[in-house]
Amino acid sequence: MFVNRIRIRVEFGDCDPAKIVFYANYFRWFDQCTSALFDAAGLPLRQLFKAHGVVGIPLVEARARFIIPSTYGDELVAESSVTEWNKSSFVVSHRFLRDGELAMEGSETHVWATVHPTDAHRLKAVPLPRDVIQRLSRTKKRAPRKG
Amino acid sequence: MFVNRIRIRVEFGDCDPAKIVFYANYFRWFDQCTSALFDAAGLPLRQLFKAHGVVGIPLVEARARFIIPSTYGDELVAESSVTEWNKSSFVVSHRFLRDGELAMEGSETHVWATVHPTDAHRLKAVPLPRDVIQRLSRTKKRAPRKG
Amino acid sequence: MFVNRIRIRVEFGDCDPAKIVFYANYFRWFDQCTSALFDAAGLPLRQLFKAHGVVGIPLVEARARFIIPSTYGDELVAESSVTEWNKSSFVVSHRFLRDGELAMEGSETHVWATVHPTDAHRLKAVPLPRDVIQRLSRTKKRAPRKG
Amino acid sequence: MFVNRIRIRVEFGDCDPAKIVFYANYFRWFDQCTSALFDAAGLPLRQLFKAHGVVGIPLVEARARFIIPSTYGDELVAESSVTEWNKSSFVVSHRFLRDGELAMEGSETHVWATVHPTDAHRLKAVPLPRDVIQRLSRTKKRAPRKG
């Protein structure tokens, strides 16, 4: 399993009047984690999408459990990896740690899809390229990097 | 079951380079739907939080399934209701329809909690007020309103 | 001058730990106001962009003055109009009122431009269509609508 | 002048259907830059706000000029510094460079203020602490750090 780690610093504007992270931001960070994961596997999204003629890796499902709230100034370590491969979809799992403790865990199910050129409402699932699966399945681990 | 409906218009800035809604925005809209649900039940959040000494209704879990993508200019009808009550937590379910078709369905588990006054990292779950449960359990339905 | 008004409800998640609107959200609302302005003038953006082969109306400048802070539960009335026309750019001005008082005023300078098909880093300014100028210069006023 | 630099990586979800950064995100990044600037000066915001009994450094004005658009995968170097000191307000200027070229420049005017404890609509400007001015006026330069 190829695991990537990035550091996320919680900003003032990420927090709500309860002084904790406004939860929609976790899902914005998932996007950042997944992008960094592909990057670390040598598959930067922009080049990948262009090479394969896909417009993105749209989501069909997302979920998160919020275990310990965080506030501005906190630094989270986010660990991400692909935990499931299907024909044209895959699951990315994320674990956010603060001071070594699990603060949040969640996952996203992405499809490898093309959006119909004239109808933004239609998506067409396409089989995942073998190369993408292989690169994201390696067992290499990376040191955390600032995200 | 008390069901509230609001209309959500998808904006240009809500969409990503795939020309569909960037998914973290659905969770931002959940917040808006839940706030409108409490409002419709006669429990506007600001007054409610002040009256009960809570700083918010933090999330412990959230999930969504994205069925049909939407793009800018689309109008979604969001139906929201509390679908589960526990001692100090509750589940709000959301269904987003476009042209009558289910485009997204998801849910959030909130806790009725106080944040520790000096430590933003600690939350204290508190039993849900009876009045809150009663008002959000009525069977009244409302016409959609612009959100 | 064609003026459009929408209502904006401030949500919990729009506010920061100071319990006031996190200011980047005002600029997100500008996008919503401008979209509603074009809509009200009979120029819905999606159709407009498609008809003219433009990918958007990118910004070259934006500014805002924050006069009275707002918090969640507040309702703002946003008044928007095009206040300046140039050959291939235009200025949209926004005034946000709360209870009749000016809470924020700002403006955005947009260009009517095509993004180079293969290089997202290049923009090409194109003369504004006469029809767009005419429709947004009419003196009709509209009642506020929920946004 | 104390200048701080951070690196900002543009994410997929930061971009709009024109495939360039949705402009409200620049203002979100300003918040991140200002926070990093205070951090680098030895004034982490959370501790600073607590020590001085302020709830934040609310904005009275913000502006930006967008010179070169950026897209996902791009890395920006953001240079930030306080460029003006007044009795109870200060201006933070930001310059975002991509590959050494100026892509965006902007500024924010913050006030050093307390929000009235019971009325979120009232702010009270307070004289800036001498220590804050001194630390942010030093001439030390720092290497870019990942933000």
Image: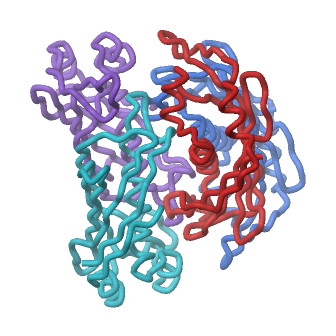
Chain colours: A red, B blue, C purple, D cyan
Q: Residue furthest bottom?
A: D130
Residue B6 occupies which quadrant of the picture? top right
Q: Residue furthest left?
A: C87
C26 to the left or right of A123: left
Which residue is found at the position 29% from the left and 26% from the top?
A: C115
Which residue is found at the position 59% from the left and 49% from the top?
A: A29
Residue C38 rendering spot, x and y as whole percentages: 31, 23
Residue B127 occupies which quadrant of the picture? bottom right
* B122 w.r.t. A32: above or below: below
Q: Is residue B68 visible?
A: yes
Residue C9 rendering spot, x and y as whole percentages: 48, 42
C108 to the left or right of D47: left
Residue A103 rendering spot, x and y as whole percentages: 74, 61
Name the residue nearer the viewer: C52 or C115.
Answer: C115
Which residue is found at the position 33% from the left and 17% from the top?
A: C49
Q: Is residue B75 visible?
A: no
Which residue is found at the position 36% from the left and 28% from the top?
A: C35
**Count of numbered badges drawn on the protein:** 0
D29 to the left or right of C85: right
Residue A87 rendering spot, x and y as whole percentages: 76, 22
B47 to the left or right of C43: right
Q: Residue furthest right?
A: B87
Name the residue nearer the viewer: B36 or B107.
Answer: B107
Classify the position of the C terminus of chain A by image quarter: bottom right
Residue B95 occupies which quadrant of the picture? top right
